[in-house]
Amino acid sequence: MSYFTFEHEADTGIRGEGKTLEEAFQETARAMFSVMANLEKVEEKEKVSGKTEGRDLISLLVNWLNQLLAEKDINGMVFKSFNVKIKKEGEGYSIEWDAWGEEMDPEKHQLDIEVKAATFHQAAVEEKNGKWTAQCIVDV
Amino acid sequence: MDVSMFTKINDYEWMIPKKGDMRVPGIVFGDEPIIRDLDEKVWEQVSNVATLPGIQLASIAMPDAHWGYGFPIGGVAAFDPKEGGIISAGGVGYDISCGVRTLKTNMKKEEVLPKLSELMEELFRTIPAGLGSEGEITLTKDQEDEMLAKGAKWAVEQGYGTEEDLEYTEMHGTAPDADPSKVSDLAKKREKKQAGTLGSGNHYLEVQWVEEVYDPEIARIYGLEKDQILITFHCGSRGLGHQVASDYMKVLDQAAPKYGIKLPDRQLACAPIDSQEGRDYWQAMNAAINNALANRQIISHLARKAFKRVFPDAELPQLYDTSHNTCRREEHVVDGVKKIVYVHRKGATSALGPGRPEIPKAYMNAGQPVLIGGTMGTYSYILAGTREGMEKAFGSACHGAGRRMSRAKAKKTWKGEQVIRDLAERGIIVKAHSFRGAAEEAPGAYKDVRQVVDAVHNAGLAKKVVRVRPLGVVKG
């Protein structure tokens, strides 16, 4: 497992790690959904795809995570795994993404509290000795 | 934190002197123990807010202040558009117009107790709550736009509640300048099935009784008496509000550098009130406020329906509805001059003093009701706004107890099942959609609401009217 949550006084921090930038993003999204559901109980039955942009990598991360929260509400789904492609585009970045999961089922997925939004608070995307980390605080 | 970082003004007011880029000083309200317990990040965030253009009087924090994103939670700041004042999405928060509504009843505690369990079951079944819950109505796009423009008034027109409810809702149930066209399609799509749902996390509905009356005269004006049963619930603007906040955080993040605004923290993203971006956010935010007001109006209707199924003769008039994540255009006197300012209250409640035109006529001499949610095991309070609070904090008070323990730590410390059993032993029935959620909201995870409310009262920001205790809780 390379996704984590970390403590914050009123809210919760989420962090993903990976060998690549893409992996770190994917794991951060898993961390976010792990706040809301028991991911072990979620099956990868359906896919939702899209493209999101950001003026830098931190905006890209925050924008994408918020996009996933919107997709959760609109499709009534909980997501478990992700596949993304990140590109430098013009002045900023874009992320093409697939998210797999299934229709939300409060009992089956042991749904917990809702993440309202991903924030720029303590948001970071960085590479150190070949390891990428992405993180931010989510508002719950 | 180190009390010497503040200049003590009196026992309940502590100043952060102006330094560096700060345009005004910071003021934190609280007694000395509260200040000692304060997170250093709050000190930093109060100082950061003080650097924003057009800020008036002081960057203020309430006694329940804790570390937020950009603005502290419990932060109050007013900006004058004529002095280049800004509007900030970070100063309102993600759950726009998250707030509290209280319904009164004509019943006493001893009349309700024999059927409490049945009542809680009925409320739990009737009010959609918890992650993934859907409301009983699915809105068409036109209905949604009308709701965003008219707020609680729209809900009353649809048959959810009465005209009288609007009299006892801030802004008569409709936020001004709301423009549905400034709300993204994505935000609207998120709302489609969420109208009339409570949400999760710290959102709840409680059946409470008035345990103590502090101010008999104001209690009489509000229609409150000892042992009376009340229903109070806490919820906000759901996915739509969160999306409006995220959308405009992006817009304002780009606008700030464009207008040459230097931000010490990116979450303070803002634009001048008199700019396209600032106006757009103002209109979208007010639409989100209307969404929250309509949401609470529908929940009121559902709560009344459930209550009357158990007690058919019950009457449930509304005491008040107040929001604690907002920005409002209000008239205030600053340094002896009347000004129109935009007051940001993030995790802070409006507490306008007697005589203000915003207050319902019946409450005019008492001041605006201030509804303070405690924790599910302890108490909640109803206070009244004061004239002194108008001068000190733009008519604002605290909004709750404030967390003292992170959610992760609370989950490690308590099991949800145990929390619910312990409360049951003390006569409080908790119906929860998530056990983990119940653990995170355990009474011990919060500061003592009594200490926070006493500090607000003693600082003169608002005065205590009654204290209420929960009998039953529906947790989202």
Image (cartoon, rainbow, N blue to C red):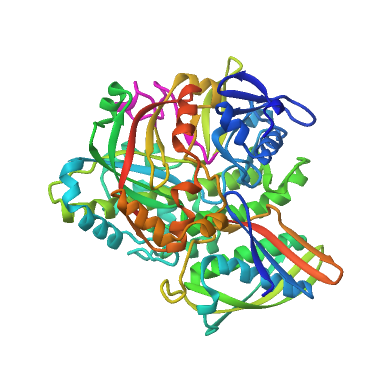
Residue A39 visible: yes
- The residue that appears at 62% across and 52% down in the rendered structure is A8
- The residue that appears at 48% across and 57% down in the rendered structure is B414
Q: Nearer the viewer, residue B413 or B157?
A: B413
Q: Nearer the viewer, residue B161 or A1?
A: A1
Give the main secondary structure, helix, strand or loop, of the magenta stretch: loop
Q: Is residue A46 above or below residue B89?
A: below
Q: Is residue B283 above or below residue B372?
A: below
- The residue that appears at 67% across and 61% down in the rendered structure is A62
Where in the figure is residue B195, as x and y percent of width and height? 39, 59
Quadrant of the image occupied by residue A29? bottom right
Residue B57 visible: no
Report the side of B23 relative to B318 (left or right): right
Segment tinted magenta in the rendering: B346-369
Quadrant of the image occupied by residue A96? bottom right
Where in the figure is residue B211, as x and y percent of width and height? 29, 35
Q: Nearer the viewer, residue B427 or B43?
A: B427
Q: Nearer the viewer, residue B468 or A122?
A: B468
Quadrant of the image occupied by residue B138? bottom left
Picture quarter with the C terminus of chain B: bottom left
Residue B382 falls within the magenta-colored stretch: no
Report the side of A52 relative to A113 (left or right): right
Q: Please identify the residue farthest to the right as the structure is shown.
A: A129
Report the side of B174 relative to B11 (left or right): left
> What count of labels does the image hold?
0
Q: Please identify the residue farthest to the top as the structure is shown.
A: B336
Where in the figure is residue A95, as x and y percent of width and height? 71, 72
